[in-house]
Amino acid sequence: MESIVSAQLLPPPGPFPRSPLRHPLERRWLHYAFLTRDGSRALVANIAWLGDEGRSAGRRNAILLTHQREVGWSCSQWNAAGPAEPWSSFRLASPPRLLESPPEMPDFELAATKGWPWARLRLQPTSTPGIGGCATFHGDHWQRWQAEPGVLARGFWRTRPGEPDPFEAVGYHERVRGRWGWPEMGGWVFGFCNHAPEGLGEGRPPEWSIVFALLQPGEEMPGQACVLMLWRRGRLIRFIPRRLLRVTAAGQLERDRVETLPAQMALLGTGPMAAVPAALCLDGYQGRDWVQLRFRGRAAARLVVPSETSLRPYSVHEVIGEAEAELAIGPHRVSFRSPAIVEFAGGATAGSWDVS
């Protein structure tokens, strides 16, 4: 009896419950994002399972996106190939694999059908996951989200035809599940940065990590959810809720710095997108502690996402740039700069982003 009770108390043996995806709007996805310490290289990947009445496991989509400062973006289609059960740190507890393990045993592998972009990486979590959040909106629509910064990556990637190049970076991993339509979702603004001034080879977590998320449900702007989380050396030390946060945006990123991907989406008459802000500012206060984050974008990729309930396109902008942070946490007064990625997601409109 004790063994049965203990088994019932364990979490699912993977990032998601072992339950079927039946409704067309039911979704699960794993998100990965990595930046080199100088910000010159970036990798972003999404692996999603969408509800399908004919298949209990759902329909799988995956996309791989890479960026090099000197050559720009490279992107797969939405059918990037990878293992049936991709790596995720949101699993049952197990001894961590070290980055020094043989490279022929990768944790993460994803590739476009044409052969590039392609990535084969060893991944190592170094930080505790953030607090999971759940938002409900538009009647029966909902989303559950959990983030984890400080994921170390080492391996090889190929962004153009030819031999693969070494890749070493620090990044972010998240899991998302829920049930929603894109028009009802409205949009979100999300971002992260890892301040890792020392080498990654020793497997140490970043000195500081910041993750923030602003959910903007359509027609429910007063009820938007927002949170900022702060990690120090792999431990979550501050959770700042919406009522203690101020979010502002300024300027517009030049249009020629925004590329529509996958490439053929630009040929389908996809509607124009709201201009991406050139700068995003977050100010959070909790008692005598405070966090200030200033993000400035440098290059953006617009990923066009099909919508199941509307002909109106929905897009996610992956924006690469630099974050400047100032912190006053207990006895610590710190300022730093680090590469960062911010996502601006929403419907195609000619207006501007409202982050108030």
Image: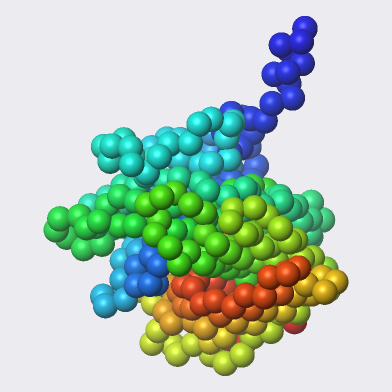
Q: Residue at x 45, y 90 (%)?
A: 254
Q: The C terminus is located in which quarter?
A: bottom right
Q: Nearer the viewer, residue 247 or 209?
A: 209
Q: Name the image quarter holding residue 190.
A: bottom right
In x, y percent, where is residue 263?
Answer: 33, 69
Visible residue check, residue 275: no
Residue occupying the far left of the picture = 162
Q: Which residue is pictured at 67% across the width and 75% down the height?
A: 333
Confirm whether residue 329 shows in the render: yes
Q: Point out the image quarter for the N terminus.
A: top right
Q: Residue 149 placed where, x, y %? A: 56, 56
Quarter of the view holding residue 11: top right
Where is residue 114 drawn, in percent x and y? 23, 53
- Residue at image coords 40%, 84%: 257
118 w.r.t. 269: above or below: above
In this picture, is 250 found above or below 304? below
